Image (cartoon, grey):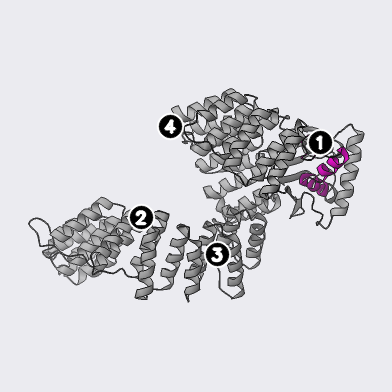
Amino acid sequence: MSPLVQFLRHVSFPPDPYLLPTALKSCPALPLTRALHAAAVAAGVTLDPFVSSSLLHTYLRFGATADARAVLDGMPQKTVVGWSALVAAHAACGDAEGAWRLLEEMRRGTAGGSGGVEPNAITWNGLVSGFNRSGCARDAVVALVRMHGEGVLRPDATGVSSALSAIGDLGTEAVAVGEQLHGYTVKSGCRLGFVVTALIDMYGKCGRADEIIRVFNESCHMDVATCNALITGLSRNAQVSEALSLFRDFLAQGVELDVVSWTSIVACCVQNGKDLEAVELFREMQAQGIEPNSVTIPCVLPAFANVAALMHGRSAHCFALRKGFLHDVYVCSALVDMYAKCGRVRNAKRIFDAMPSRNVVSWNAMIGGYAMHGEAKNAVRLFDSMLMCKQKPNMVTFICVLQACSQAGLTEEGRRYFKEMQHEHGISPRIEHYACMVTLLGRAGKLDEAYDLITDMPFEPDGSIWGSLLGSCRVHGNVDLAEVAAEKLFHLEPDNAGNYVLLSNIYASKKMWGGVNRIREMMKDMGLKKEMGCSWIEIKNKVHMLLAGDDSHPMMTAITDKLKQLNIEMRRLGFAPSTYFVLHDVEEQEKDDILAVHSEKLAVALGLISTSPGTPLRVIKNLRICDDCHEAMKFISCFEGREISVRDTNRFHHFRDGKCSCGDYW
């Protein structure tokens, strides 16, 4: 029994209306609250307004809404404060139906009890704030609109910020209400720092990047919370350049940015394809004495993965280990993904096996890692283990499994999983699943079946579907079906130069130079240019970026010399460049020159001259590896005695002793 209760039982005078409220205010647990309530009943003081109000608020503090309602029902005079507290508590618990019902009871009064009480500003603000905290965004906005409809009530700063947060969660459908609330804050002078932050956050979630900047510029507040909201809002709207510029301005102006600020800008860069900038910002963050937390690590790991910065990823892994972050499922899942994308799928599996708990993201990362490396059997085996562990797969899981089947040519298995997804797991196939199936069938040479699947889809196929079919047509040289797919793509994605280039490559492989010239003229008329090939390689803890045809790298002369040496050696061993897919109808020697400057060859040459003999090389490319480079990597791995890993947009290719892990099925 609590010392406080023992004291109340043994004192010579009963608890009075002054002692009980003080005891209730400091009460640490619900059982003790009920004991004090019993003492109040025994002393006959429960009808005292101070005692009953204290009991009601203490019960609500512990979430005991039923006990609080019983106290309210026992009050001879039910006050607006008591009703408001109970209504807000139900809203904060996510009980929208109960909160609205209580509001109506408050107005009309209870049968046999006192008359009704009109809600005031405290009631409505509590309702809005409670709904927002419990994730009932729509009810929070409805409460705000009804509050405004009363004609006499106005939200306070807390209510405004809560309402703005709820509006942001609803997105564009509620932005008109957000604009009205913005106008109210301007007219009423309700422009406190946290209100400005809430406005920026709301406009960011509603896709109004222009308003984000305007609100910030019109505000005299520049605290860290506002700066963080600004960076996050710009990131959501793909305004990465503006976010980076403002972040630098904040640093120059001496704003004391915290770990949230740095994490936000790193995440902004990663989400918008600025991986090298994210890596540099992470290093700068540490140099300035800002220690990463368990949110920062999974935010920056995808950047390391995207540019194959394995040493940086290992450093982050060691840091997470020292700080005890490896119990965090999101940190570990990000590490699994990073190691897999950096070519170290065995390291990824070790992290996965050591995880104290796993969620669907963890399983997907590991299954996707196996798929990326062409290890379909391991991917399928792990998927079976996932089901045995009673982990429910989601749509992403089946994308990973279907991709694994596609990489290894497991056509029948892919068909089976596509059916099981629908009939056994209740997951309706989305466009991504159909794209996987089109790729699976197309790469297996079943182009007509892939086309039939597209025509039978329950929704209109998008660019990913037709792009999958066009890619398969290139592999099998099917010009007729390629033209059908390409025409669809030209309509859906008129500005995507890659589609034109792919069709032109198909024409070139058949020496149909008239078709090649027609595509070139189309691209010229539309102002389209082929996407520049780009590759990344990490050497001595530094990531180097090589562009096809670009000679700006400081070691380009040595790289070029190495490529010439490689070319001589390859030709001596019988290698002949695969020039059939080169876009231009030009002389063979000119085609050789075009192939020689592909970015993955530049990256490998840089690796060869910058590392010790026998050191494995890891290269990441932004496009698919071409046939010529694929064959060249086999030769180089053989006579240089190197393991060379190249990750293109589709999968990993591990070259060793003149062979590729894909078995030339790619």
Q: Amino acid at mark 3?
A: Ser
In space, the residues marked 3 and 1 are separated at their CA atoms by 50 Å
Q: Are marks 3 and 1 in contact (CB under 8 Å)?
A: no
Q: Earlier in the sequence, mark 1 or mark 4?
A: 4
Q: Residue at x 38, y 58 (%)?
A: 166
Of the 4 image quadrants, the one containing the N terminus is bottom left
Identify which residue is drawn at 36% across, 65% down. Answer: 180
Number of the label disc, if any, that sits on residue 261: 3
Is tag 3's residue or tag 1's residue first in the polypeptide sequence? 3
Res 426 label: 4
Q: Is residue 140 left or right of residue 553?
A: left
Q: Earlier in the sequence, mark 1 or mark 2?
A: 2
- The residue type indicated by label 2 comes to Ala
- Distance from Cα at disc 4 to Cα at disc 3: 41 Å
SS for callout 2: helix
Distance from disc 1 to disc 4, alpha carbons, whole Å, reads 47 Å
Mark 1 residue type? Thr
As helix, strand or loop, the secondary structure at mark 3 comes to helix
Label 1, label 2: how many angstroms apart (C-alpha)?
A: 59 Å
Vertical side of 606 occupied by 229: above or below:
below
Asked whether disc 4 touches disc 2, contact meaning CB atoms under 8 Å apart, the reply is no
For the point 74% across and 45% down, which residue is it?
Answer: 618
